[in-house]
Image: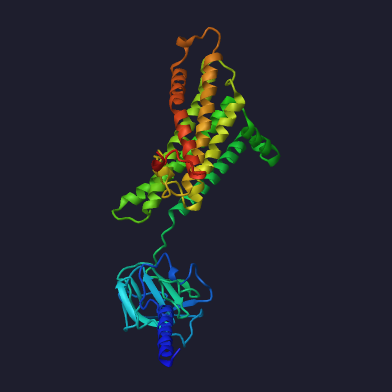
Amino acid sequence: MNKKSMRTLLVLSAITMAMIVSPAVVSYPAGIQGVKDSGCNCHGATTSSEVVPSITGLPDQYNYSESYEIVVSFVGGPTSPTNSNQGGFNLWVSDGELLPSDATVQSYNPNEVSHTEAGNDQTSWTLTWTSPSSDRNVEFILHTNSVNGNADGANGGSSGDMWNKLTAKVSPPVLVLEEADPFVVLSTLILVSAILLAFTLAYVFYRTNPESFTWDYFAPWIADWLTTTDHKKVGTLYFVAGLFFLGVGGIMAMMIRIQLAVPGNDFLTQDQYNQFFTLHGTTMIFLAAMPLINGFANWMVPLQIGAPDLALPRMNAMSFWLQPVGALLIFTGVFSGQGADTGWTGYAPYVVSETAHMGTTMWVAGQIMLVASSTLTGINFLTTIAVMRAPGMGWLQMPLFTWSILVANLMLFLSIPAFGIGLIQVYLDRVIGTAFYDISAG
């Protein structure tokens, strides 16, 4: 090979290597917006404790419409003063206005700023924040990324980069209470209601027999109520449970009305409103109204037809205890912040879609428990009315209330099987991936 060919080959090799290597040293020159919730995912999947972001210059308590010079910076991570690019930032503020102080910072809107191409080779940036003119708790969310200088974005050269997040809060001159999470409020009120119910039960026992108000007498009294099969006591349990959940449903109704009381209110988000609406309807119908009806039926039907008890006393007790189990499943999503959001009717195919919250699965499971409870209750009442009437009492001699329970349970058996089967199909679709409500599967 002559020298000319050798030189040509070397030049072509150099050009080829430059084309391969050059993308690995080109990074995104400017910052990006909209990372308040998602984070700097292009610089790593999760936050890294090796990167330590900071905000200096923020007051503990701001003055109205006053401008503050603040500095955002970071230390740590793979950055080095010898790198062509060292890092970047994104700062979001809930209130007030952020303004760049020099060419290293750019503004996307009054609430969000980031670095520019000129600010990509440093670890500290200066900007100005103008505080709001009214009393608001202000939140700052800062994301900083530390880069090793090989980021090319499109080809994954950002491997080895790190980022982290910092949240800071500044108070107004007049103290403003933080908005409580609606699910925390609901859970607290449910807990308070349960405690008040427990105190009420203890007071009832005390009033019944003040001289024997000790645990030795109280424990058997509670155990008798929890294990009873007597129709009157089971009916009383239905009353207590129904009134308790009537209060819970009422609490959710008041929280819905709080959201609707003022135009543009943000007490409940859109998702939370759908969840409260779903749980309110479910609670009022299945956990309040139906147990109260069953309470009246348990008390009145055997007495009106001359029966000593219901035909199936143990099934009667089981029917009641399925309701607290179903309620616990239904409200599981509340305690995790992901309650069912499909409406209390649970329309398909939305109820099986990926957009429905995970709490929907537990809501469906709880509904299945309530369907089982209603089915067993219906069987019990129909059997009792059919075969345990007093001698000489024919169908036309039965009181109207007993007739109403008979007709209601007959109507229940026209609807509850279809409802229960539909719920089971929804549960299977959500848990094991069947296709009962999958439109694409026909």
Please tell me which residue lies in front, 245 or 74: 74
Residue 192 position in % (x across, y down): 52, 48
Residue 37 position in % (x across, y down): 41, 64
Residue 403 falls in image quadrant: top left
Residue 68 at least partly seen = no
> Is 318 above or below relative to 165?
above
Residue 232 at least partly seen = yes
- Type of colouring: rainbow
Residue 348 falls in image quadrant: top left
> Is 210 above or below relative to 295?
below
Please tell me which residue lies in front, 13 or 35: 13
Please tell me which residue lies in front, 357 or 388: 357
Q: Residue at x 51, y 47 (%)?
A: 332
Question: Residue lying farthest bottom?
Answer: 3
> Is 340 above or below relative to 142?
above
Residue 55 position in % (x across, y down): 43, 78
Residue 70 position in % (x across, y down): 38, 80
Which quarter of the rendering shows the N terminus? bottom left
Question: Residue lying farthest front?
Answer: 1
Q: Residue at x 51, y 44 (%)?
A: 431
> Is 368 above or below relative to 375?
below
